[in-house]
Image (cartoon, rainbow, N blue to C red):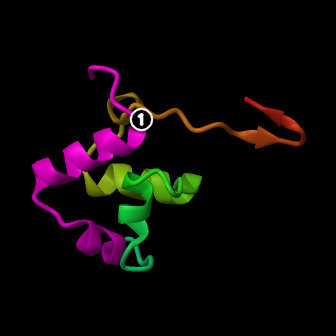
Amino acid sequence: MDGLTFAERLTELRLLKGVSARDMSLALKQNHNYINAIENNKNLPSMKNFFAICEAIETNNNKQLGYIPKLLVGDFAI
């Protein structure tokens, strides 16, 4: 994976699928610039949207995306 960030890897995988950021955003039922904001490090997806993104780019492996979301439990991040 060559040390790519989540945003960089998402862009790479999305482009490999031939899907525009706008089309992916709308497919996820989000604002038209949602994926663009993630790819420009202005936003991170919720857990629900993270899994929807994985499904959209046909990966079930968050390591392939280079992102392991933190689960928040009370005041602790795990």
User: Mark 1: which secondary structure?
Assistant: helix
Location of residue 12 with respect to 49 vertically, above or below: above
Q: Is disc 1 surrounded by few (<14), some (14 to 19) or many (20+) residues within 10 Å?
A: some
The overriding secondary structure of the stretch rendered in magenta is helix
User: Residue drawn 39% across and 71% down?
Assistant: 28
Image quarter for residue 74?
Answer: top right
For residue 50, side relative to residue 3 (left or right): right
Q: Quadrant of the C terminus?
A: top right
- Tell me residue 39's x, y (percent): 37, 53
Q: Which range of residues does the magenta coloring cover? A: 1-27
- Tell me residue 14's x, y (percent): 21, 53
For residue 49, side relative to residue 74 (left or right): left
Front residue of this view, candidates 38 and 63: 38
Location of residue 69 with respect to 54 vertically, above or below: above
User: Residue drawn 35% across and 40% down?
Assistant: 60
- Indicate the amino acid at tag 1: Asn
Front residue of this view, candidates 2 and 51: 2
User: Residue drawn 27% across and 23% down?
Assistant: 1
User: Residue drawn 33% across and 29% down?
Assistant: 4
Total labels drawn: 1
Q: Which residue is mark 1?
A: 62
- Tell me residue 18's x, y (percent): 10, 59
Q: Is residue 2 magenta?
A: yes
